[in-house]
Image (cartoon, coloured by chain):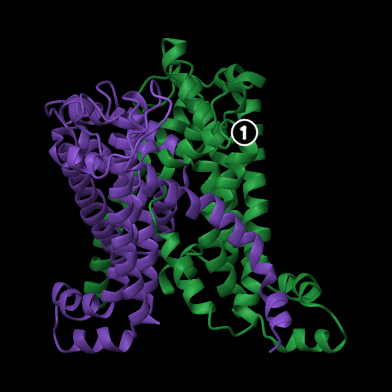
Amino acid sequence: MPRKRTSRRLAADLSLLAVAVAFALPLAWVVLSSVDPHANLRVRVPDGFTLDNFDAILTPDITYTPLLNSLVLCGGGTALTVVCAALAAYPLSRFRSRLNRPFLLTILFATSLPITAIMVPVYALFVRVNLIDTLQGTIFFFAASQLPFAIWLMKNFMDGVPKELEEAAWTDGASSLQSLIRIVLPLMGPGLAVVTVFSFVMMWGNFFVPFMLLLSPDQMPASVSINDFFGNRGMVAYGQLAAFSVIYSTPVILLYVLVARRLGGGFALGGAVKG
Amino acid sequence: MTPYRRITRALPLSPAVVLLLLFLAGPIAYCVYIAFTDLQLTGQARASFVGFANFRHAFQDPEFRNAVWLTLVFTVLSSLVGQNTLGLALAALMKRASKPVRTLTGGVVITAWVLPEVVAGFLLYAFFRREGTLNAILDWLHLPRQNWLFTLPILAVSFANAWRGTAFSMLVYSAALDEIPSEITEAAEVDGAGGWRRMWHITLPMIRRSIGTNLMLNTLQTLSVFGLIWVMTRGGPGNRSQTLPLFMYEQAFQNSMIGYGTAVALLLLLVGSLFSVVYLRLLRTEV
């Protein structure tokens, strides 16, 4: 029996390692190419180590402005999402109402709609109401598209905070808003962090929304400006493209690690799959 | 409860409701409206109502049927076969593997998932290009090389989507497998049931609800993939990897037919809603 178990573990280990290598090859390409003076399209050990690729792209035009735009868009969108979701989750979690269930089912239904499908009408609508090519318009749409899932997650986390603690505050004369801000939100810190990080990560990686709604090059976030490495610059500098990808991806990977550590692997799934 | 109190209690919902109505429900309603018009980007000043013409056009348009077919292939290959099956296999293997291997593999697979969509597109573009990594490996194995993005573009983008989305299924199934009481699998083992039989007769039936919800979510996510394919192939060569979202975009902007593009969008939205309703029903049996 123990021998059988060891051989079984070995087989599992080897299969998983094979999968890990297959999954890692594209990732290895981006990391290795970013420090390779002669990067091309295939994975290889660099024939030298250089930071020239990073040097070349760390200019306002190529890196700083797009990243700042991303930060404004996703920061603004996330702030709006989190504030609206926290406010909305409070009555849903605290007060009984006949409307709660239909509202929550609608929200859950909306979380799984393919938002990609409505980008063409959103574009047409934004042209009509003069929101096209504006950061605020894009921020509003980002927030609205992320809200259903954020409300759903937030409500589930809020249900975990016992109601008795607020009742004491209410007898002392605190309003709902005061008890939400002073008592409930501080107690659901990790949940709040999950909603914030998840919203931010989703927006940071989103390509189609800013691609459709923003037109001026100086407003483009990193997810869209990365396309400039192709096309109008002629020959593609793969090393620089890789270096840019590394810089652009690092924040979301760090944020994920930060939150995943605190809450265990499948943090994003808590609300989505368990219902 | 007084009406006044009822209103003040519901007040915190209002910012969210306003945002959702203006920026989500509004566009969806507008989508339903312009799908029945001949709105164009250039030329005529006003759009006129054309009834079901856009939809009739779509069902007769060979390019639309091509896009439907490719969307189906893309969804089945990348979501059903790729993400779902590979995710389940990884989760099952992880239960047996040693801790360092588990951590390493999990880390790599999840990194692929967390990466921004466009970056993932570039990485897989580099992987599949004629001068890319895959052909280098084939050379090394003395196997014939291919210009993957030209000969099998839909396969390449399906693989890319599987690469990017497997982590989600892996996490869902790891959680589901952890909830199976170990006594049950041990009892079956004592009774002499082998690995495959245990998987088929015990594990799969016990996690069937997770399988259902996970399949729905994977499919919905896959239906709306745009950036990944856009970066890798632009829907080409020709229209050989042009799934519905890319077809919708091309009709609306390259061909300036917003009305027609929106009709396609509405069909996509309807298919999505259908899946979404099934997903809700699956959840309801679970709650």
* Image quadrant assignment for residue A92: bottom right
Would residue A79 be visible to someone looking at this image?
Answer: yes
Q: Which chain is purple?
A: B
Q: Residue furthest right?
A: A172
Would residue A21 be visible to someone looking at this image?
Answer: no
Residue B229 in the image: state x and y as whole percent. Answer: 32, 35
Q: Nearer the viewer, residue B258 or B280?
A: B258
Residue B90 in the image: state x and y as whole percent. Answer: 30, 60
Q: Chain of mark 1?
A: A
> Where does label 1 land, which residue?
A134
Q: Is residue B166 above or below residue A159?
A: above
Q: Residue at x 43, y 51 (%)?
A: B28
Q: Is residue A77 left or right of residue B167?
A: right
* Image quadrant assignment for residue B39: top left
- Callout 1 amino acid: Thr
Q: Quadrant of the C terminus of chain A?
A: bottom left
Q: Secondary structure at mark 1?
A: loop
Residue B183 in the image: state x and y as whole percent. Answer: 31, 89
Q: Nearer the viewer, residue B17 or A10?
A: B17
Q: Is residue A75 above or below residue A68?
A: below
Q: Residue at x 19, y 48 (%)?
A: B72
Q: Quadrant of the N terminus of chain A?
A: bottom left
Tell me the shade of chain A: green
